[in-house]
Image (cartoon, rainbow, N blue to C red):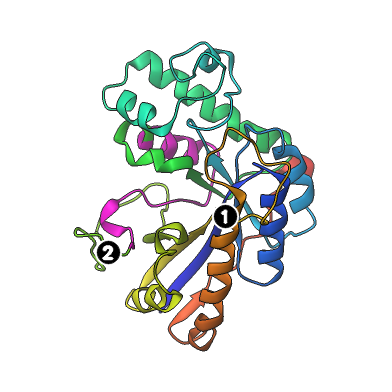
Amino acid sequence: MLNLTITADDCGLSRGIDQSVIDLHQSSMVSAASIMANFPQAQAAFEAYSAYPTLELGAHLTLTDGKPLTRAAKRSGLVKHNGYFHDRFFLFSMSLFPSEKMLGIVREELSAQLDVFVEAGLRPSHITTHHHFHTIPAMRKIVHELAKQYEVSWVRNSDFRLSLVPFNPIFSNKLVNVQQAPTTTDYLTPIKVWLDYPPQALLNSVLKLDGWLELIVHPCIFSDPSYPSDVIYSPAERYREAEYLRRFFDILQPHLGREVQLVEGQAQRKLERYA
């Protein structure tokens, strides 16, 4: 039996993304939402999602889009002259041999992004990272330490061997026997990389697995005036992902409860002092 979690990334980036996530959740597709706490829309996202207690809310930590929250990060090499984070290629190159000072700045910034949840009275149920930066060992160590500190339930898998994509020469459908702390998903697959393939091809690959698979979607409505102009991946491209997910979900139906079990989103984890 395969357990399937469907997670929407980049929540809190724009109103159109949040609306699309709610639509998909109401259709019983998306069960988890990863919020980017460093964007102005994040607070509105918390309010919008509060009406859906079965939608699991987690943190989509970012060091490659938007502006940092901490003073140290704003003054560091993580950002460009305009105050926005450098792109992922810069971050990945910088992270190969990071200084202790830089790692301290990264930890402080990521903690600040998690603290946005705490200030909203919530404990993030999971952690994912924008552009998957926790595949880098130094960054993964920080993310896993913060996951323990903030008592999150699970963290997105960062092992390329367990990434289900149309072509992955090192993919293994036998789970790598590594003790993980915190808990991580067994496999992951982004819808984005399947868009040039029919949904049946994705389903065929999914049905070969046992364990826990996280399916990732970056949804949006087709036209979104609130979408940040500096973010490259457009609303129309995101809308295409949402439509692909709907088609995939249609052909998944006969297999639900047999080969595939949907993992329902956890109830929003409110902190005791806010309960």
| Residue at image point 74% right, 45% down | 46
Q: What is the number of the mark on residue 177?
A: none
Percent coordinates x, y for residue 102 in the rendering: 39, 17
> Marks 2 and 1, Cα distance to the nearest angstrom?
30 Å
**Secondary structure at numbered mark 2:** loop
- Dot 2 alpha-carbon crowd within 10 angstroms: few under 14, some 14 to 19, many 20 or more: some
Image quarter for residue 36? top right
Residue 213 vs residue 68, the one in the foreground: 68
State the residue position of label 1. 238
Q: Is residue 47 left or right of residue 64?
A: right
State the residue position of label 2. 175
**Secondary structure at numbered mark 1:** helix
Percent coordinates x, y for residue 80 in the rendering: 49, 17
Callout 2 amino acid:
Leu
| Residue at image point 58% right, 50% down | 125
The correct choice, above or below, for 223 with respect to 174 in the image is: above
Percent coordinates x, y for residue 146 in the rendering: 48, 35
Q: Is residue 65 magenta?
A: no
